[in-house]
Amino acid sequence: MLNVTVADGDGDGVGDACDNCPAVSNVAQTNTDGDSEGDACDADDDNDGIADGTDTAPLNPDCVRMPMVMVAMIAPRTEVPSRPVPTTSQRTMVPTPTVMVSAIAAMATTTTTVLPTALTTLR
């Protein structure tokens, strides 16, 4: 039932005083992480500190993946070596904490402005 007795800036039928996202219409009032912002306005729906746009699992705070960097690739040699070498290619992957710290620092300085039609991120 539409509530016509109180202010409802986004016209979703939920009064602004009770609306978890008063500038964007969201009848369901979904709030995945239980914070003060509904998912329609929340830039981090699972509240894991990684913005939804870069999060590999934006609705699952337990699934955090760190970027991986290929450290070495060893290919077989064609000449006869003086010592044994691997006969197949090998890849070694290690997490890069510096990249992760830089990404988190960049997110901390990002400001999000909510518009009725879209989310716009400003730096």
Image: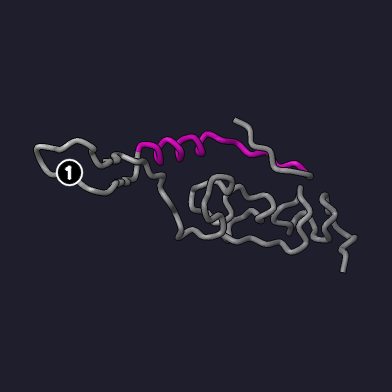
- Asked if the stretch drawn in magenta spans residue 7, the answer is no
**Residue holding disc 1:** 85
Q: Please indicate, yes or no, whether residue 7 appears anywhere in the rendered image.
A: no
10 Å crowding of disc 1: few (<14), some (14-19), many (20+):
few
Residue 116, x across and y down, in percent = 78, 44
Q: In the picture, which quadrant includes the N terminus?
A: bottom right
From this view, report whether residue 44 is shown above or below residue 34.
above
Question: Along the line of sight, which residue is nearer the eye, 1 or 43?
Answer: 43
Q: In the picture, which quadrant includes the C terminus?
A: top right
75 displayed left or right of 101: left
The stretch of residues the image draws in magenta is: 98-115
Residue 23, x across and y down, in percent = 76, 47
User: What kind of residue is marked 1?
Assistant: Val
Type of secondary structure dominating the magenta stretch: helix
Q: Secondary structure at mark 1?
A: loop
Residue extending furthest toward the right: 4
Q: Residue at x 29, y 46 (%)?
A: 89
Q: Residue at x 61, y 47 (%)?
A: 43
Q: Residue at x 40, y 41 (%)?
A: 100
